């Protein structure tokens, strides 16, 4: 089963400095049939104006993944972590027992990110933060784990959940496949470029909620940049 969620049907709010689109219920947007997808709780498509951002605020017991699509995001938290994550790269914050952080676009241009929240397998644990680059060439023509709780994904940023966040870049006409284990849920968004997923067309920034599909076959109709989340039901 694949449910297409067109970008223009997403909830959201425009705060001036932040234009946020929500694939699932979040903040002031509430849709009782879009409360999450398995362990995936949040997928926000955020456009952040230059020299602005999220001031310090707390989180606990959530895996928070930031995928930078354009520009850069600068992180600072109460543990002393600081970092700047640029387009195509990823940061992961395991909130654990609690962390206070700020995320700013300190750049002269607009920053666009996907912010993805996954419910951890267990509550608690010391909070952590990390980031790493994922050059687009490494993801060319295939799905590569960017953040993962799977033991075999040694090059991915760690997650405290039995989940994966994967990325792929495809040129028009190329395709990539991903096996989805029984009982798993997946959610796919093309950050740019139209694609076909198991024969269903998805335009850029549409969401696809996937279950009971043993294999995902993605064909690029245009040059495309994909983000896929694989979570327990």
Image: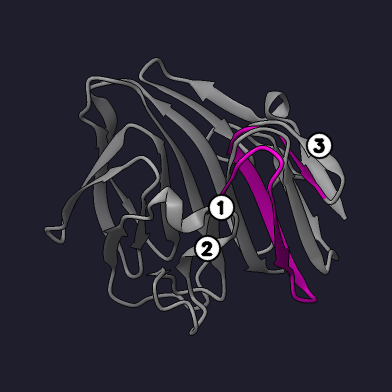
Residue 5 shows up from this direction = yes
Tell which residue pokes out farthest to the bottom in this image.
Answer: 151
Left or right: where 220 falls relative to 123: right
Residue 37, horizontal then vertical, whole percent: 69, 56
Report the side of 51 relative to 67 (left or right): left
Between 218 and 172, the residue placed more toward the observer is 172
Gap in angstroms between the C-alphas marked 2 and 1: 6 Å
Under circle 1, the secondary element is: strand
Q: Quadrant of the C terminus?
A: bottom right
Whether tag 2 and tag 1 are in contact, CB under 8 A, the answer is yes
**What residue is rendered at 81% in x and 37% in y?**
201
**Cα–Cα span, label 3 and label 1:** 17 Å
Residue 165 in the image: x percent, y percent? Answer: 53, 60
Which residue was labeled with disc 2?
A: 144
Q: Which residue is mark 1?
A: 168
In the rendered image, which quarter is residue 80 located in?
bottom left
Residue name at image x 34 percent, y 77 percent? 125
Q: Quadrant of the N terminus?
A: bottom right
Residue position marked by numbered label 3 in the rendering: 201
- 8 sits to left or right of 228: right
Mark positioned earlier in the residue sequence (3 or 2)? 2
């Amino acid at each position: 089963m694949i449910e297409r969620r067109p970008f223009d049907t997403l909830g959201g709010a425009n705060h001036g400095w932040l234009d946020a689109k929500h694939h699932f219920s979040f903040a002031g947007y509430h849709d009782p049939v879009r409360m999450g997808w398995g362990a995936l709780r949040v997928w926000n498509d955020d456009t952040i104006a230059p020299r602005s951002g999220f001031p310090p605020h707390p989180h606990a017991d959530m895996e928070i993944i930031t995928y930078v699509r354009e520009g850069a995001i600068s992180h600072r938290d109460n543990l002393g972590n600081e970092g700047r994550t640029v387009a195509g790269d990823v940061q992961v914050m395991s909130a654990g027992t609690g962390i206070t952080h700020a995320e700013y676009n300190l750049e002269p241009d607009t920053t666009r990110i996907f912010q993805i929240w996954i419910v951890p397998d267990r509550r608690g644990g010391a909070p952590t933060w990390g980031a790493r680059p994922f050059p687009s060439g490494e993801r060319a023509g295939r799905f590569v784990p960017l953040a993962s709780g799977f033991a075999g994904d040694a090059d991915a940023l760690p997650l405290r959940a039995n989940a994966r966040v994967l990325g792929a870049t495809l040129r028009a006409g190329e395709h990539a496949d991903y096996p989805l284990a029984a009982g798993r849920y997946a959610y796919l968004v093309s950050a740019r470029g139209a694609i076909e997923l198991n024969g269903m067309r998805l335009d850029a920034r549409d969401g696809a909620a996937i279950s009971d599909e043993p294999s995902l076959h993605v064909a690029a109709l245009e040059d495309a940049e994909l983000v896929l989340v694989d979570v327990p039901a």
